[in-house]
Amino acid sequence: MDLTGAIWRKSTRSSGNSGDCVEVAGNLPGVVGVRDSKDPTGPVLLVAPAAWRAFVTFATRH
């Protein structure tokens, strides 16, 4: 998948330790991109939007 148009964002809950965390691109057609902020040219995990919403819901409740 071509990710050149991906708009990456970090969580507002990123740590103060140089801001290393995951970045998420939610503007891709039919998928959500997830990558390591320390390695922006590295691998990207692509997940279905419903799966990403379920993960975020679970993570914010635990």
Image: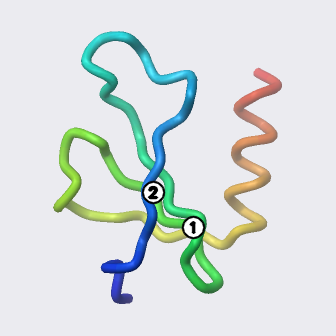
Identify the residue position indicated by label 2 in the image.
Answer: 34
**SS class of the residue under badge 1?**
strand
Compared to 42, does 17 lie above or below?
above
Quarter of the rendering occupied by the C terminus: top right
Compared to 28, does 9 lie above or below?
above
Residue 44, image x, y percentages = 34, 64
Q: Residue at x 48, y 65 (%)?
A: 33
Quarter of the rendering occupied by the N terminus: bottom left
Amino acid type at mark 1:
Val
Identify the residue position indicated by label 1 in the image.
Answer: 32
Q: Residue at x 30, y 42 (%)?
A: 37
How would you rate the neighbour count of disc 2 (Cα within 10 Å): few for under 14, some for 14-19, many for 20 or more? some
Compared to 14, does 28 lie above or below?
below
Amino acid type at mark 2:
Val
Q: Residue at x 57, y 67 (%)?
A: 32
Mark 2 in CB contact with mark 1 (< 8 angstroms): yes
Describe residue 51's horizontal placement relative to residue 37 as left or right. Answer: right
Q: Quadrant of residue 8?
A: bottom left
Q: CA distance from mark 2 to mark 1?
A: 7 Å
